[in-house]
Amino acid sequence: MIARTPRFSGVVPPVVTPLTDDGAVDVASLERVVGHLIGGGVDGLFALGSSGEVAYLTDEQQETVLDVVVKAAGGQVPVLAGAIETTTNKVLERARTAVARGASAVVTTAPFYTRTHPTEIDRHFRTVAAAIEVPVLAYDIPVCVHSKLSRQLVGALAADGVLAGVKDSSGDDVTFRQLILDTRDVPDFALLTGHEVVVDAMLLGGAHGSVPGLGNVDPHGYRRLHDAAARGDWTAARAEQDRLARLFDIVAVADPATASGTASGLGAFKTALTLLGVIARNTVSPPMRPLTDAETGRIGAILEQAGLR
């Protein structure tokens, strides 16, 4: 079988949203993040994802983020925009706004908060895809949505041309591998892993790319990883993945007694980017807290061990 290369493939980091001290979008820092990522050799940008704090941002902030990312990218790479809302009508509103502002594709989850049935989730994706002129990718993140997209559902939506791909952050690598097999003959369907510490294994299994939050911090590392996999040098790919897995320890630095897993991860990425001089500050959206000076020091040490400082 000839390997497929879908339109959306390779390294597609979920872009962090830098904030000012008063919680506004830090436009200058966001522009630098985009430059940092494109300079690192990424293949696309995922704006308004979980790492972009989409659930915390107001509509106005989301529009600002998308405008800045699309303009800063300047057509060099595609911009995928998250349309993450609780119900179909709200997703449609966000998706249409994203298309109008230049997004190359829209990424959305199943509906959440409301109780849903698998047939309603199926109808949700079909309704969104029929309403906009750009490709739609499913975002499978049950830890936040509280429902897992089944391989049967995604496979059927892929076969029918409803979905252009899936961003899998379920942590269910068995089902993801099965989905790779289920969709191997679906033209241009992209299988993207959000499991950033096992990207090498996912690529070996047939994934087309990754959407690594840690890619904000070290896009060059994920570029090297993907390039090694593409040329079949799995020893080099594993070595790079091992280094990135150690770098991922930054997300465990925050004190779990006072910070959620979300705050720990987002705070770590932003703190690392601050230490690297990419963004001005590590402010996160309320009610999350920024990392402390002591936690920042530990992240600095991990960055040094990873060769980034």
Image (tube, rainbow, N blue to C red):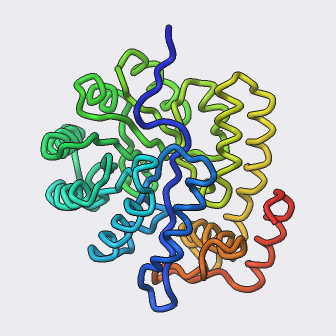
Which residue sits at x=29%, y=42%? 136
Q: Position of residue 170 (x, y in %)?
A: 48, 45
Between 90 and 29, the one lying in front of the other is 29
Compared to 243, does 54 lie above or below?
below
Compared to 144, does 19 lie above or below?
below
Q: Would residue 206 be visible to someone looking at this image? A: yes
Q: Position of residue 183 (x, y in %)?
A: 39, 21
Q: Would residue 171 be visible to someone looking at this image? A: no
Which residue sits at x=21%, y=38%? 122
Between 40 and 193, the one lying in front of the other is 40
- Number of marks in the rendered image: 0
Between 79 and 252, the one lying in front of the other is 79
Q: Position of residue 76 (x, y in %)?
A: 46, 49
Which residue sits at x=52%, y=38%? 172
Compared to 155, does 266 lie above or below?
below
Q: Position of residue 120 (x, y in %)?
A: 18, 43
Say which quadrant the C terminus sits in.
bottom right
Between 237 and 179, the one lying in front of the other is 237
Q: Tell whether 211 sits left or right of 219.
A: left
Q: Tell whether 39 sits left or right of 239.
A: left
Q: Name the quadrant containing residue 151.
A: top left
